[in-house]
Structures are given as C-alpha cells and as structure tokens.
Amino acid sequence: MPLERLDKILSGQNIASRKETKELVRRGLVSADGRTVQRADEKFDPEKTIITVEGKTVAYKKYLYIMLNKPRGILSASRDRHTPTVVDLLPQELKREGLFPAGRLDKDTEGFILITDDGELAHRMLAPKSHVFKLYEAVCDRPLTQTDVTLFAQGIVCGDEKYLPAKMKITGEKTALVEICEGKFHQVRKMFHAVGTEVLRLKRLRIGEVYLDPTLGSGKCRELNSDEIIKIISQKNEL
Ligand code: URA
C-alpha cells in the first residue's frame, strides 16, 4: 500500500479532520508504532503502521461495506438536491468520503442495499455481464399461479426486453419470492407486469449469498461482518 499522509489517513477514516489532526499532533496525542508523531503531513503505510490517537488504536479499514435496509421513498444515490438518499441515512460514525450504493433499488423498493467505497467491487457487481443473484419478496395485486411460475422460469419477454429465466416461489396468495440474476431497470416490476399483475410492494432480501439482517429495522444499517465481506467480494458472477 502506498504511503499516505497522517492527516489524510485520519480524515479518510472519519477520525479527525485535517485541521483537527494538526491540533492532535501539536498536542502530542498521535503515535505511530509507539513513537509520537511530529507532523500531520508525515507519511505512513496505513495497513502496516499501528497508529494511536489519544491512546486508542486506529482500526484502519481500507474500504467500508455497509448493509442498509432501505425504506420506501429513499433514492439509491449518494446525493440528491431534493430527495433523501441511502447515503444520507448513514449514521455519523459510518459516514466517510466516497461512499455510494453498489447497485440500485427503485425509490419505492425496500430492503438490502450495499453501500461501499470499494469502486472495483461495485464495478464488478454492476458490469452488464455480471450475474449476481438477488432475491426479492414481492406483494402483487392478484393471486399468483403456477402459470406465472412457469412463465418466469421460461424467461419473460416484454416488448424489446428479454429477461433471463427467473425462479419464482409462491409464498402466499399474492406474495412470492423471486430470484433474478440481472439488474435491469424496474426488472421485477416489469416481469410481473408482463404476466398481468402489478407489484404493490417489493423488498430485496439477499444479494449473492448475503441475506439482509432480519434484525435491521427499516432505515437501519450495519457494517458487513468478515464472513459477509468474503462472500460479497468472492461471489461468482458467471451463470
Ligand atoms: N426490480 C425492480 O423492479 N425494482 C427494484 O428496485 C429492483 C429490482
């Protein structure tokens, strides 16, 4: 890892602004590998150096991976002038520069959205050829039938759009679980529309092999644990 300035490391980790770092250093409150740091622009390898601030070790994280249970009405974007975004919902301790949603859910769709600053992972997940499986729970406006299941399994064609075969499992009169491996615009809603039903509620429950934590209330988030990070990073994108 290239060397980085101390003030950049601490501001990037949301520990202290550049100005605050200068002040902490001036007061002798920052150490690197046991030695008091003299200058805020001194450079270190953040992955190898044990940095402490006011006696507390900095748990350096190159990237953040955050699971958010997105509520309805929130935009899958980093910033918007008019509408609250998924990044706006993050608590202060998880906010840092460069975070964005890896993938999108419609404004009215709820559930699992991954927020990260790992651009390479997002690029891999979102590439058109990437086929990360995603599981949704849909509530529809008419009773669902085995014919719907068969049509989904055959691959829905809707106007010019052709969707790959999708698994549907009916879980209630008007509810179903649907697994798709593409991320086309309004895909699940359009697939249901093509078989003659409208989706009243849609929630994403899983990305790849990682499930939305059922203890996360609407609008709440947490960092992925190490198992989940490994699953997300190493997920196979081929069909
Ligand atoms: N399919 C949809 O229709 N909407 C989403 O947000 C995700 C998948």
Image (cartoon, rainbow, N blue to C red):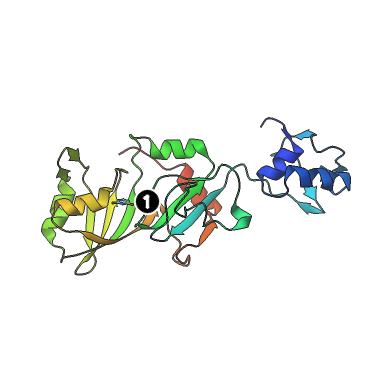
Nearer the observer, 234 or 191: 191
Decide which of 128, 170 is in the foreground and name it: 128
Q: Within 10 angstroms of label 1, few (less than 14), some, or many (20 or more) residues?
A: many
| Residue at 59%, 51% in the rendered image | 95
Q: Residue furthest front?
A: 82
- The picture places residue 45, in percent across and down from the top left corner, at 72, 35
At a point 51% along the width and 48% down the height, the residue shown is 229
Which residue, given by chain and number where applicable, does mark 1 sit on? 105
The percent coordinates of residue 192 (x first, y second) are 19, 54
Residue 230: percent from left, percent from top: 50, 46
Assess mark 1: CB under 8 A from ligand 1?
yes
Q: Residue at x 78, y 47 (%)?
A: 20
Asked whether the viewer can see residue 11, the reply is yes
Looking at the rendered structure, the secondary structure element under dot 1 is loop
| Residue occupying image coordinates x 72% and y 44% | 10
Q: Is residue 48 left or right of residue 221?
A: right
Circle 1: residue type: Leu
Q: Is residue 218 above or below residue 67?
A: below
